[in-house]
Amino acid sequence: MVRIFVAAFAIGVLVSGAAVAQTKKAAADGKVPPACSAIKFRPVPSGMADGEQDAGLYKSRFGTIMVRATVKGGEAQDYFVVVNGKKPQAIAGGPPAHVADCLKEKKIGAPMKLTTGPCAGSALHVVIDRSHGQKVMMLIARDGREWKMCSASTV
């Protein structure tokens, strides 16, 4: 029994070492993130303590994305994105037109206008478009069948 445990442990160490080596090799090979990506987040549950609460965290070798909620009375009032510990710079006038292709690729209805007011919905997506050199990050909420763009920023 002990031999099986030791063998399983040794295999686990070898596999994790190979995964780390593969990640380092990918970074050394100059692999770049995809031109268009979408990350799904769930809204915070009802009954959370008032203040800012984490709705979700995504961490990769390219950075950390956090979706946070402002909670009041136990309900989320607004959602926002934090990238590598900072709120990203908002794009004046909304996102550039080329992000529509990325939104279509990810099967998100193209909400090209920024909504006014708080950001809320039954599902949250952070969509990142790198296709035209400038990295554009959008927080999009889905409420029923309706998509609304809560924020657009450069990262």
Image (tube, rainbow, N blue to C red):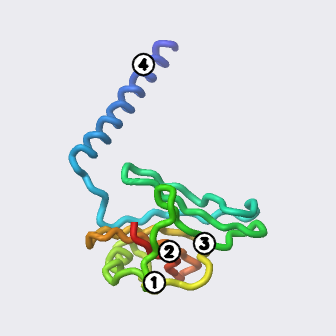
Marker disc for residue 75: none
**Disc 3 target residue:** 122
Helix, strand or loop at label 4? It is helix
Using the rendered view, name the quadrant where residue 133 is placed: bottom left
Identify the mark nearer the N-term, 1 or 4: 4
Helix, strand or loop at label 3? It is loop
Asked whether disc 2 touches disc 1, contact meaning CB atoms under 8 Å apart, the reply is yes
Is 13 or 87 nearer to us in this picture? 87
Quote the CA–CA distance across marks 2 and 1: 8 Å
Q: Amino acid at mark 2?
A: Ile
**Disc 4 target residue:** 7
| Image quadrant in which the C terminus is located | bottom left
Identify the mark nearer the N-term, 3 or 1: 1
Residue at 45% of width from left, 83% of height from top?
Answer: 111
Quote the CA–CA distance across marks 3 and 4: 46 Å
Quote the CA–CA distance across marks 1 and 4: 53 Å
Residue at 49% of width from left, 72% of height from top?
Answer: 139
Q: Residue furthest left?
A: 29
Using the rendered view, name the quadrant where residue 127 is placed: bottom left
Quote the CA–CA distance across marks 2 and 3: 11 Å
- 100 lies above or below 52: below
**Disc 1 target residue:** 111
Callout 1: few (<14), some (14-19), or many (20+) C-alpha neighbours within 10 Å?
some
Residue 24 location, x and y as percent? 30, 40
Q: Nearer the viewer, mark 1 or mark 4?
A: 1
Residue at 60% of width from left, 74% of height from top?
Answer: 121
Identify the mark nearer the N-term, 2 or 1: 1
Using the rendered view, name the quadrant where residue 17 is placed: top left
Q: Is residue 39 left or right of residue 145?
A: left
Is 125 or 95 nearer to us in this picture? 95
- 115 lies above or below 120: below
**Disc 2 target residue:** 140
